[in-house]
Image (spheres, grey):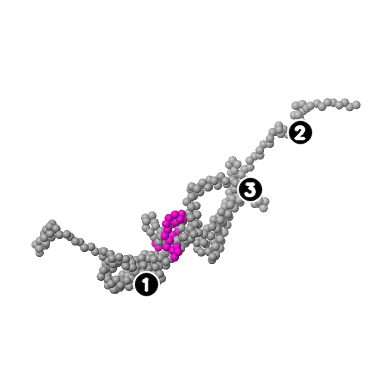
Amino acid sequence: MTAILPEIPPTDTDVEASPELEATPTQAWSLAEEAPPEADVVSVAEGAKEGLAAQNDTLGAVIGTLDSWALVVGDVRISVFDVVFLLATIGMVITAAWFISRLARNLIGRVTAFDGSQQLLAEKLATIIIWAVAFFITIDLIGIDLTALAIFGGAFGLAIGFGLQKTFGNLISGILLLLDKSIKPGDVISVTDQSGNEAVGQIRKIGIRAISVITRDQTEYLIPNELLMTNQVVNWSYSSRDVRVKAPVGVSYDSDLDLVTKLLYQAVDETSRVLAHPKPSVNLMAFGDSSVDFEVRFWIQDPEGGLANIRSAVYMRIWQLFKENNIEIPFPQSDLHLRSSKQLDQLVELMSGGKASSQ
């Protein structure tokens, strides 16, 4: 007959000696919440690292060696591999973007339906789009989360609002100038320097920030696009390249005015660069103090060739024709009239007496 013994609860000694409890010496932690895992260390291009290492054992060993040389600052880990991968990625993306933008410019240049300003506008828009896409591709290849750029985007927006306001203003102004075709490469405009001297120059190119205007003396002005949108600009070739030049001429009162008019017409007809249509005109402007004032008006079609030189050529031919026909070009003369007075008469007599005694 088997006796049934009551169960005896384990004592503290039995608990300490239990082999199952010895395998779990930290049993007290089972009643508490699990500890949060250690924060992952940030590493650039982790996926690319694993993909490249899986391609080849030798390449994996090199990548492992480069990745072992690292600098850890807080939760950020930057290895030599990260730096090399970053530089290589940026270099490849920049090279590809430069090649694609150049190819796009060549393709746009072959489009015959676009004029000069439309081609330039299309090239600029294509360039902006290509480099924007290249930027986001670089961010994706490096492995940077775009949501992490939210704070940077806010700071960058403030930088645009304050520091880069003029730059983006000039960019938008350049695009607007090309859209409305008010100013385009090849146009001739008037340029005023800081001293107030006006010069005529031809637009060489329209850049992102400014336009390049070159004058006849090969001085190149860089004018911000924003100034052309807000200030008054004289465009000599906006709707037509024909430019009228004026040349004032004065002759003496003894001259034959009909002959003078004929000679003035002959002078402009015999000068190169002067257009036959529209026809030149000779106008009698005024009867001046010492001359009869005429003005010769004629047209040219190449203002970029200079205005002063064509006016000089017309004046030179007028001088030759006037010399051949005895037409006098007077110079200013003044007659001095002295009112008679007792003191003046005495002075004249004294001077006359002195001259007589000297003789």
What distance separates the C-alpha of mark 2 from that of mark 1? 120 Å
Residue under circle 1? Answer: 269
Badge 2 density bin: few <14, some 14–19, many ≥20, Cα 10 Å: few
Q: Which mark is residue 20?
A: 2
- Residue ID at (65%, 51%): 52
Q: Residues within 10 Å of mark 1 (few under 14, many from 20)?
A: some
Counting from the top left corner in percent of width and height, residue 79 is at 60, 46
- The answer to which of marks 3 and 2 sits earlier in the sequence is 2
In the displayed structure, does residue 14 sit left or right of residue 326?
Answer: right
Asked whether disc 2 touches disc 1, contact meaning CB atoms under 8 Å apart, the reply is no
Res. 84 visible in picture: no
Q: Report the amino acid beneath label 3.
A: Glu
Amino acid found under the numbered disc labelled 1: Asp
Dot 3 corresponds to which residue? 46
| Residue at the spot 61% in from the left edge and 51% down from the top edge | 141
The residue located at (36%, 69%) in the rendering is 281
Magenta segment: 212-240
